[in-house]
Image (spheres, rainbow, N blue to C red):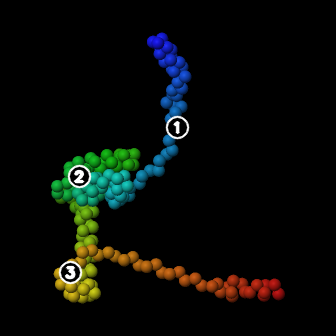
Amino acid sequence: GGGGGGGGGALARAFQAPRPEPETVASAPEPARPVVLRRFEDVVAMAGERRDIRLKGALERDVRLVSFEEGRIEIALADGASRSIPTDLARALRDWTDRQWFVSLSAEDAPAAPTIFEERRRRDEERRHGASEHPLVQAVLKSFPGAQIVDVRERLPEPEPEVLTAPDPDEAGGAPEEDQA
């Protein structure tokens, strides 16, 4: 029985498809659309699209933007932020855009924007304060002691309804009977 097993192996090897050379298998990949990030907010959105929730959270909560240009970002870190954020961000940007990005930490005294989280909180406070000044809201708060403004949402203006009008026969060139006469 041992000779039959060896012959079967030789037979199996003889019928195996030859392995193609790497050059014949590899076809030219279609060129990918380049990823263009024009603002820091685009970088944060890209982190969300790529489902890198840890990095997206760090960018929103811990990063203060100093300057941004294609391929180069200068940031300051909020207190308690991970010192690996610049390295993590540069690595992610290289993976997403297929090009090198330089992410640097600014000097401590460099003017930096608030974090995205801080800016959101500031806008929410402004809206809440603006709402509390509205006479109708003041009347509700006065009528219900202990009531608080929890959330303020802006309503988008409702679209104007389209008004369809019948075409003016005078502008259309007159009635068809006049053209035949």
Q: Residue at x 48, y 18 (%)?
A: 9
> Is 37 situated above or below 162?
above
Residue 18 lies, in percent from the top left, at: 53, 25
- Residue annotated with mark 2: 105
Query: Who is closer to the viewer here, 7 or 38?
Result: 7
How crowded is the residue under tag 2: few (<14 C-alpha within 10 Å), some, or many (20+)?
Answer: some
The residue that mark 1 highlights is: 27
Q: Label 2 is placed on what type of residue?
A: Leu
Point out residue 157 in the picture as x, y percentages from the top left corner. Answer: 41, 78
| Spatial separation of the CA atoms under disc 2 and disc 3 | 44 Å
Picture residue at 74% right of the left edge, 87% below the top = 175
Q: Considering the numbered disc 2 on the image, is that residue within a helix, a strand or a loop?
A: strand
Element on which disc 3 rests:
loop
- Which amino acid type is marked by label 1? Ser
Q: The disc labelled 3 sits on which kind of residue?
A: Ala
Distance in Å between CA atoms under marks 1 and 3? 67 Å
Q: In which quadrant will I find the C terminus?
A: bottom right
Q: Is residue 99 above or below residue 179?
A: above
Q: From this view, report whether residue 35 is shown above or below residue 164.
A: above
108 and 24: which one is in front? 24
Which residue is denoted by mark 3 in the rendering?
147
Q: Are marks 1 and 3 in contact (CB under 8 Å)?
A: no
What residue is rendered at 29% in x and 75% in y? 152
